[in-house]
Image: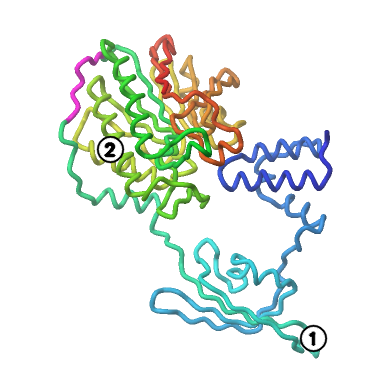
Amino acid sequence: MKLNKIEFLSKQLEIINEIRHGDNTWSSLTDLRTEFYGERLHNDTVRKGGLLLKEYIDEGWIKKPSQNNFENLRKNISVNGDGSQVSEGKFVIENEEVLRDSECLLNLHNYDPLKWELINSKNSFWDAQIKGGETKKLYSSKITVKPKKTDWSVEYIDKYFENKVFKSVNELTKPTNYDDSGEILEIDLPDLHAGLYSWRQETNEDYDIHILKENFLKCFNDIIERCKGRKFEKIILATLGDLLHVDNDNQTTSKGTFQQVDGRIAKVFDTTLDVIIDAVQLLGNFAPLEIVYVSGNHDRLLGYSLVKALEKAFRNDSNITFNISPNPRKFKRFDNVLIGWLHGDCNKNNISEWLQVEARKDYGDSLFAECHAGHYHSQQTLEKSGMIIRYLPTICASSAWEHQQAFNKSVKTVVSFVWNKKSGLREMWYSNL
C-alpha cells in the first residue's frame, strides 16, 4: 500500500536517523523516495538535503532558516584562560526556537558547531523599538563555549606511533611449513565489536570482553588445527572494520552514537590487542603473514590506533607485513585472483564498482574477483557484473538495539578462504562457535 505524504515523511526521518547512527545507508532512503515519487535520483542528490528540507518546509513541519531570521545588534566576546570563550549579544530573532537548540545558538554567535561545543547559555527577551520605531522582540543571549579537541586524528596517531618507543614481541615468528609455490589462506575478521556489552535477559546471550577473548581464541585454534600439515605461500589476516565497539572513553561510536560498553576503553583496547597479537604469532609460524586493515563506522580512529600498535609490536619481524593505511578500501591480486576488502557501510550499488575502477588493471588481468565486507553481521552473497560480493558474519553478540530490531540471526563464525593463484577459490573454512 502506497504511503501518504505524512507517513512518507515520517519514514524518511526514521531512515535519516538510522543513517546518522551508521545503521542504514543513503541507498535505502533513495529506494523509499523512488517508491513514493516514481522517479529515482542519484544518492548524492538526496544526501545533499536540499530536496528533503523543502519537503518538510512545505508541510509546515519546520520554519525555513534564512539570513533574515535574526539581526545582530551588538555582541561582546571575552576569552578565558582555559581556552573557553563567553559571547554576549542582543539579537532580533523571528523564531525563539533558535535559543533552545545548541547548534543554532552556536551559529547565532558565529561559532562553528564542528569546532566548538556549548557549555551553558542564558537568554532573555523584551519588547523594544528599533529601525524607525518598529516594535520587535529583542533577545539577549549569553553563551559559554569551548573548542572541541582536534588532535585526535589519523595524522595525530601516525605521528604518535612514529616517535613512540615500544618493546618488541618476545619471539619472532618462524614459518615451519612454508611453500612459495603453495596456496593463499585468507582469514577475514569483520565486526569483532570488542567492548560490546550484551545481557542474556535482554538479548538471549551474554557478551563482554572475557567472552570475546574466549570466542576469538576458539575460532583461531580451529584455524590453526586446519593449517597443520598444509603448505601456504602466504596468509592474509584481513580485519574488516569495527574491531572495537566504540571510538572513545565517552562510549560513543565515531559518529557519536552512545553504546553499552563492558568497562573502560583502555581495558578493552589492551585485551583486544593482546588476543590479536597471540593470533598473529600463531599464524606467522605457518607462512609469511600480511595484516590488512580497513576502518569501520564504530571505531574509525581507535581501530586505526590498535593496528598501528600491532604494527609496532612486530616492527622487527620481517615475516609479518602490514597494509593498514587509512584508506577504507584495500585490494590485492595474486596472479588470476583479485580480492577487495572494505567494511561494507557504503552504498550497496557501489560495492563492486569501486574495485573495477580503483583496481582497473588488476581487474582486467584477473579471472576471479571477489569483494569481502562486513557491517551487516550476517552472511550474504551477491553477484554483480561477474563480481562475487560476500558480506561476512561475525562472532560478536547482538546489541540490545540489534536484538530489538531482530538483526544478527546469522551463525557466529570466522570465514576463511583457500585460494589457488591459477584456478581460484578452492575451499571455504567455517570456524563456528
Q: Secondary structure at mark 1?
A: strand
Residue type, numbered disc 1:
Thr
- Mark 1 or mark 2: name the one nearer the start of the chain: 1
Residues 35 and 396: in front is: 396
**At 26% across and 23% down in the image, what residue appears?**
288
Q: Secondary structure at mark 2?
A: helix
Q: Which residue is mark 2?
A: 274
Residue type, numbered disc 2:
Asp
Give the image location of residue 187, x and y in percent: 38, 24
Q: Is residue 171 above or below residue 196?
A: above
Magenta stretch contains residue 178: yes
Give the image location of residue 80, x and y in percent: 42, 79
Quarter of the figure with the C terminus:
top left
Q: Quadrant of residue 59?
A: bottom right
309 sits left or right of 206 in the view? left
Q: Which residue is mark 1?
A: 135
Give the image location of residue 104, x and y in percent: 63, 67
Q: In the image, which disc is placed on residue 267?
A: none
Residues 110 and 396: in front is: 396
At label 2, counting other C-alpha atoms closer than 10 Å, the crowd grade (few under 14, some 14-19, many 20 or more) is: few
- Magenta range is 172-179
Residues 134 and 22: in front is: 22
**At 25% across and 25% down in the image, what residue appears?**
282
